[in-house]
Image (cartoon, helix red, strand yellow):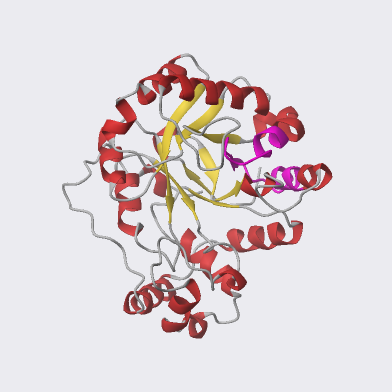
Amino acid sequence: MTDLPTRLLGRTGVRVTTLGFGAMELRGAPRGPELSDQEAERILNDVLDAGINFIDTSIDYGRSEERIGRFLSHRRHEYFLASKCGCVVGGAQGEHVHTAQNIRHGVENSLRLLKTDHLDLVQFHRSLTRQELEQDGALEEALKLKSEGKVRFLGVSGTLPNLVEQIELGVFDAFQIPYSALQREHEEVIGKAAQAGAGTIIRGGVARGAPTDWQRTNYMLPGTTMQDRWERARLDELLDGLSRIEFTLRFTLSHPGLSTTIVGTRNPKHLRDNLEFARKGPLPREVVAEAKRRLSQAGSTPEAVPASGVRAAGAAQATAQA
């Protein structure tokens, strides 16, 4: 048993720790910083020893799948394993081909590297339209892999505007969605996905990891930076002794539609810190409300989703907590 809070991953019925592990940091050079096998083995086993039971990886993440298979396959029963499809095995990072052949080849290669006979969750690594999912047999092939038992559940790493259509398709069990205090665009649609019975996996929940990285711009923050938003919202006034990272992670955990948030690190101390923060759970409601008020004034606001845009398919299971 773990002392980490858990929630249901939607209709899958699986309870996952609210803090998951994003394994992109295991990719190694040249796609990322140097990381020895010994360091990878240590951090992966530290993750499981701490009670985290959700690991997210991808074909795109260099040596990540290989290292998980090499160092954790003997502990396969301890974690829910999520990977991606649509990526090209051996291709350039970000290269995707959504044909039936490539979907099957990618999943079967992942099974080999991860040294397992099934993936708990396979997610399309791009937020595709229904036409793109169907035109070359990609979705049909993913469903075949599910019927064969090689995949238990299907998902999408999704973003607006296509996320609404993906939820409405009714075939995806989970959605990986970007969200943090500083990037609230998907705040409303996360709730819609949960209301439809899907699990929600939040990425970017600590705003790219560290305040020292906030000076960078990215595609979701045109013309501004995370630091700009933080300072305009005067969030330091709400910390009350918390670090910025703890505040940001616990703000993310405060979303009632969240199942888990994946946070990646190569640093054992950072892992220990994240575990400590996650154990404390969501921020107080009044702090979240005030933070949202200030953030909205600073430009961090949810995108509206029409009430008819997503049909409910059951109770909001992802809000259930231990």
User: From this viewpoint, which residue is outermost toward the top?
Assistant: 148
Looking at the figure, which quarter contains the N terminus? top right
- Residue at the spot x=25%, y=37% of the render? 168
Apparent side of residue 221 relative to residue 276 in the rendered image (left or right): left
In percent of width and height, residue 95 lies at 50, 38
Name the residue furthest left. 308
Instruction: Write the start and end of the magenta stretch as one range.
Output: 43-68
Q: Is residue 89 magenta?
A: no
Q: Position of residue 52 (x, y in %)?
A: 64, 46
Of residue 53 and residue 220, the one placed in the foreground of this image is 220
Seen in the image, is 221 located left or right of residue 71? left
Where does residue 114 sit, x and y in percent of width and height?
66, 28
Instruction: Give the quarter of the image for residue 133.
Output: top left
Q: Answer with the quarter of the image where residue 74 lies.
A: top right
Q: Position of residue 208 (x, y in %)?
A: 55, 62
Q: Residue at x 57, y 22 (%)?
A: 118
Residue found at the far front of this picture: 92
On screen, residue 307 above or below 134: below
Magenta segment: does it hold 44? yes
Q: Look at 55% across and 27% down and name the residue there.
A: 119
Furthest toward the right, the residue is 38
Question: Which residue appears at 41% of the width and 45% of the height?
Answer: 318
Q: How many marks?
A: 0
Name above or below for residue 251 compared with residue 47: below
- Side of 24 relative to 44 (left or right): left
